[in-house]
Image (spheres, rainbow, N blue to C red):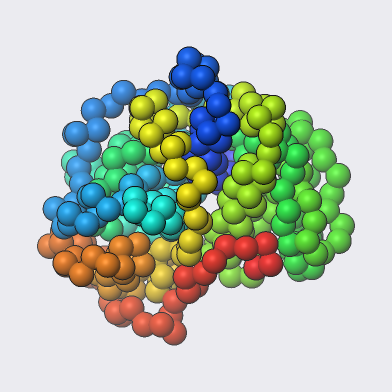
């Protein structure tokens, strides 16, 4: 297999909640304002006017004032590409991080890369969500989420190829419970990564709870052919997030500085330094709560040239359940006319119109933990 083909197959993931955690710790342990701002300036900055990003008309006051919602993108790019523009990369992974501003609970929603959505562009068309970032950069990807899910996201963080591996290595590895049936696929992914990145690593030869280095943990999170495909892969991604957060919180200042220096040059965001510093103030109050994959209820047909897709069954009822999960106290929410139209259009195109039922859910809301 050629090197270019190996690169194309080497998938990344969105573990970008680490960004806020690192900034939070840096502030709390006493980094000066000058140093902190200088460190944040290492990231790729996107100065797009956020007031021009389209949000849903169905967003309620509870959602606006009670929650901070951020889109976290993992991109299939490398070589320090400009992650703030269109045509550079597809989003191989996306996680919606929703922070309750009062309780400080953080909920994570993995949007499946093949989720069938209407793209946010002048002539909307239905595609796998992963195409949105390539078609119109982070703005198009955010607006696609807002359009299809009735959200008001304007902030994002994107990470490129080696950031996850480098961050975990700088942390000294993370603890993951590896299953016996995951070993072969993990080591296959690991060998492919070594050939592409040049980052050497031993294999993982036994199951059970153990410390994985950056390359091993990245290979673990990329496992796709064991269990329930991409659905279970997103569970592994969120397990890695949880383990990274736990390790970062107990790390010393020198370790955090190493992680920041490794990761920040591989990060892009449209959040201002002021926004990031404000988030930092509540570091030790944050609590990682339940997490899910979206759509919760779905079917996986093959649609001609659009390929194998994950179709919400149906979009309208899935969005209702998404809002119940993210904003449980928001009893005023009613899906927008736009979501109702998109749901009907997807049903007409795919023939899949079943409403949400528990027996069709891919995964129930769960606590991410190393035991899985």
Of residues 111 and 329, the one drawn nearer to the viewer in this rendering: 329
Tell me if residue 304 comes above or below residue 141 in the rendering.
below
Percent position of residue 197, x then y: 71, 33
Mark yes or no: residue 42 visible. Answer: no
Tell me if residue 325 comes above or below residue 251 in the rendering.
below
At horizontal 82% and vertical 64% (from top left) the residue drawn is 207
At horizontal 37% and vertical 45% (from top left) the residue drawn is 70
Of residues 200 and 308, the one drawn nearer to the viewer in this rendering: 200
Percent position of residue 227, x then y: 64, 70
At horizontal 45% and vertical 29% (from top left) the residue drawn is 268
Quadrant of the snapshot with the N terminus: top right
Percent position of residue 52, x then y: 19, 34
Q: Is residue 348 left or right of residue 181?
A: left
Q: Quadrant of residue 48?
A: top left
Of residues 252 and 12, the one drawn nearer to the viewer in this rendering: 252
Quadrant of the snapshot with the C terminus: bottom right
Tell me if residue 143 comes above or below residue 347 in the rendering.
above
Tell me if residue 162 comes above or below residue 220 in the rendering.
above
Percent position of residue 145, x then y: 31, 51
Mark yes or no: residue 39 visible. Answer: yes
At horizontal 48% and vertical 64% (from top left) the residue drawn is 290
């Amino acid at each position: 297999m050629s090197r270019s083909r190996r690169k194309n197959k080497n998938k990344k993931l969105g573990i970008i909640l680490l960004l806020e955690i690192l900034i939070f710790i840096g502030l709390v342990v006493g980094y000066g304002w000058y140093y902190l701002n200088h460190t944040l300036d290492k990231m790729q900055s996107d100065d797009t006017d956020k007031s021009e990003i389209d949000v849903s008309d169905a967003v309620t006051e509870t959602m606006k004032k009670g929650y901070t919602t951020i889109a976290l993108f993992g991109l299939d790019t490398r070589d320090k590409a400009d992650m703030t523009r269109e045509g550079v990369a597809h989003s191989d992974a996306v996680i919606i991080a929703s922070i309750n501003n009062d309780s400080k609970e953080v909920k994570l929603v993995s949007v499946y890369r093949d989720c069938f959505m209407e793209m946010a562009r002048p002539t909307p068309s239905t595609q796998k969500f992963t195409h949105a970032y390539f078609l119109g950069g982070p703005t198009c990807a955010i607006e696609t989420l807002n359009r299809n899910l009735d959200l008001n996201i304007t902030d994002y963080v994107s990470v490129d190829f080696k950031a996850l591996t480098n961050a975990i290595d700088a942390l000294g590895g993370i603890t993951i419970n590896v299953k016996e049936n995951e070993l072969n696929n993990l080591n296959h992914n690991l060998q492919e990564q070594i050939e592409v990145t040049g980052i050497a690593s031993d294999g993982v030869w036994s199951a059970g709870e153990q410390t994985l280095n950056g390359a091993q943990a990245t290979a673990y999170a990329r496992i796709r052919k064991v269990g329930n495909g991409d659905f279970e892969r997103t569970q592994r991604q969120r397990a890695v997030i949880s383990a990274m957060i736990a390790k970062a919180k107990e790390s010393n200042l020198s370790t955090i500085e190493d992680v920041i220096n490794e990761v920040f040059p591989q990060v892009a965001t449209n959040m201002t330094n002021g926004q990031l510093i404000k988030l930092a103030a509540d570091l030790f109050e944050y609590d990682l709560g339940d997490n899910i994959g979206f759509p919760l209820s779905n079917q996986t047909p093959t649609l001609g040239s659009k390929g194998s897709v994950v179709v919400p069954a149906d979009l309208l009822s899935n969005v209702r359940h998404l809002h119940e999960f993210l904003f449980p106290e928001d009893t005023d929410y009613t899906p927008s006319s736009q979501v109702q139209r998109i749901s009907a259009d997807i049903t007409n195109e795919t023939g899949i119109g079943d409403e949400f039922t528990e027996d069709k859910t891919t995964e129930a809301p769960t606590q991410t933990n190393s035991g899985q």
